Image: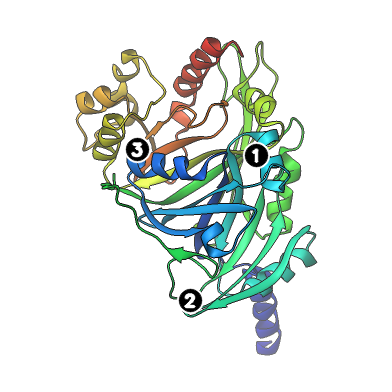
Amino acid sequence: MDTLIAQRTAADTAQNEDFLPLKGTDYIEFYVGNALQAAYFYQLAFGFRLVAYAGLETGLRDRCSYVVQQGKIRLVLTAPLTPDSPIAQHIARHGDGVKVLALWVDDAEKSFYETVKRGAILAQAPQTHSDEFGSITTASIHTYGDTLHTFVERGNYQGAFMPGFVARSSNLHTEPVGLQYVDHCVGNVELGTMNQWVKFYEDVMGFKLLITFDDKDISTEYTALMSKVVSNGNGYVKFPINEPAAGRKKSQIEEYIDFYRGAGVQHIAVATNDILHTVGELRKRGIEFLYVPDAYYEDLVARVGYIDESIEALRALNILVDKDDEGYLLQIFTKPVQDRPTVFYEIIQRKGAKSFGKGNFKALFESIEREQALRGTL
């Protein structure tokens, strides 16, 4: 009997073992038309600091990259130097947008082969690069649209970013706004493909389905969408996946897909420990946010109960609040941060809540619809 129990316990342990342990988001790489100007924007407006650079001066002939960082958030801003490069082609199709969601791992080679064995499509086989600061191993697989997941193993590296980059600082004086880490990244996919990509994350990457929102949860008089949230084992990496749902007018997901020319990253949620300070600073620096009418705040206390923050302070900054069984959260969404109505940011502060602001969906989507109407795309 003891032997049988031991065998069952071993089998359960093997079955439940996380074959893809993730330590978090390593970096997010944007392909942009002008990396120098994009780096200036993120420094001046969002308070990132410049930490590394690669380009002509480091031996690259086809592209240049600026790496900016705040807290645990690292953005790589990459622009093409030749019109016929894959980077230029990506920008011509999609505009400025996210190319790589890089994941921090202990073993990039194992992560790559475990996911490929389960059906991932190879983008870059494992490669190890070294310089005087140590070595880094990376490998990449495809996910929705033209987006990649790159596994990054950096335990043996002490440099500014990775081999091929040099440490770089800026004469521009910047002050951080309190951004801490990436909370989640949201992908928009074509109609009818959401479940396919949820299955990809479940089967190929070992993620679990965390929550489902249908068109009754996320809808207004005019538009609707559906969303499922997948998360890795320790919860450090969460990916909501959205697809359009039937509505009277064109939804925000359809607008995104029209202008991005396919599936891609819709928004990046970044966490702060003091959303009042963060949003106040961002507004001073010119960041524009979606607008929610004052009526939203009239029944706020009745909806969410006691909160630490002043309702008037939240109203003044247009910050939204929602609750779940474990606490509450505060959130706000920027307008798109490039010319096409595609990628934007969410600023979020969690005070116990582990959810995604379901109670704010209607107000948020009505706000997005007002912006769509101004753009003539509703």
The first of marks 1 and 2 along the sequence is 2
The span from disc 1 to disc 2 (Cα, nearest Å) is: 30 Å
* Circle 1 SS class: strand
Category of crowding for the residue at label 1, using alpha-carbon neighbours closer than 10 angstroms: few (below 14), some (14–19), many (at least 20):
many
The span from disc 1 to disc 3 (Cα, nearest Å) is: 24 Å
Residue at x 43%, y 67% (from the top left corner): 160
Q: Which of the numbered marks, if any, corresponds to residue 157?
A: 2
Residue that numbered label 3 is attached to: 45
The first of marks 1 and 3 along the sequence is 3
The first of marks 3 and 2 along the sequence is 3
Residue that numbered label 1 is attached to: 264
The span from disc 3 to disc 2 (Cα, nearest Å) is: 30 Å
Residue at x 72%, y 47% (from the top left corner): 86
- In the rendered image, the quadrant that contains the N terminus is bottom right
* Residue 12 is at least partly visible in this image: no
* Circle 2 SS class: loop
Residue 19's quadrant in the figure?
Answer: bottom right
Look at label 3 and name its amino acid: Ala
Category of crowding for the residue at label 3, using alpha-carbon neighbours closer than 10 angstroms: few (below 14), some (14–19), many (at least 20):
many
Residue at x 73%, y 52% (from the top left corner): 200
Numbered marks: total: 3
- In the rendered image, the quadrant that contains the C terminus is top right
Percent of width and height locating residue 147: 67, 47
Percent of width and height locating residue 370: 49, 13
Residue 377's quadrant in the figure?
Answer: top right
* Circle 3 SS class: helix
Q: Is residue 37 left or right of residue 281?
A: right
Percent of width and height locating residue 276: 25, 36
* Residue 350 is at least partly visible in this image: yes
Of 330 and 10, nearer the camera is: 330
Q: Please, is residue 106 above or below residue 68 in the view?
A: below
